[in-house]
Image: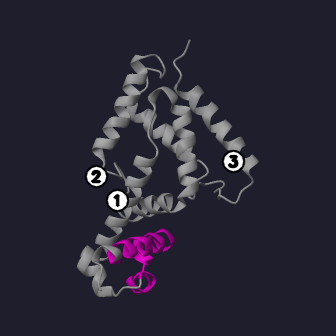
Amino acid sequence: MYDSQATRRRLIEAGTAEFAAHGIAGARVDRIAVNARANKAQIYTHFGSKDGLFDAVFAENVDVIINSVPIDGQDLPGYAVRLYDASLAQPEMVRLATWARLERVPVGDLVTDFEDQTARKLQAIVDAQRSGHVDPELDPSDVLSIVTTMALTWSPASLFYAVTDGDPEADHDRRRRALAETVRRAVTPPK
């Protein structure tokens, strides 16, 4: 018995691995189909094209990260540490975002389909500015970008060192402490 939703799920999972490893241009629908235990025609039936599959893979992965890491505007250091942990647990998300930036959207907003979630995060920062937890002189969108980028300092897109979940826990703890303290110093209102 054919299960359309199960096939779609397998194609998303296989597409995630393929696009994260090879990018959009380098990904091969043949490999995706084989790894998904599907055929190429099913990719086109479910997603219309290889680009359509990438869009679905990217949207699902972004949604997982956005929704799995809730923001607390009054605890941006904690938010940054949770983002660090999320990127450690799902390095393919950072790779997918890097490929999307390289191959699709060289400037401007990378993620436009999640405006509601972004608006909620920005509002949390505005609220934290009003309550005195975040420097009100900083633009909320800049704060969100800075904190997110700090959290991804050691991600697969890092210029210096990309962490893995196999690194010693003491190293992760050291990075989490440095990240939290740096974010705290960056966003706290001056005295």
Pointers 3 and 2 in contact (C-beta within 8 Å): no
Tell which circle, 2 or 1, labels the residue nearer the N-terminal end: 1
The mark found on residue 59 in the picture is 1
Residue type pointed to by label 1: Ala
Quadrant location of the N terminus in the rendered image: bottom left
Circle 2 — which element? loop
Disc 2 to disc 1, C-alpha distance: 8 Å
Left or right, 3 with reference to 98: left
Circle 3 — which element? helix
Disc 3 to disc 2, C-alpha distance: 32 Å
Residue underneath mark 3: 172
Which residue is more in the foreground, 161 or 30?
30
Disc 3 to disc 1, C-alpha distance: 28 Å
| Chain part drawn in magenta | 7-36
Left or right, 35 with reference to 120: right
Which residue sits at x=28%, y=77%? 4
Left or right, 174 with reference to 48: right
Q: Is residue 14 magenta?
A: yes
Few, some or many residues within 10 Å of mark 3 (<14, 14–19, 20+): some
Residue occupying the far top of the picture: 191
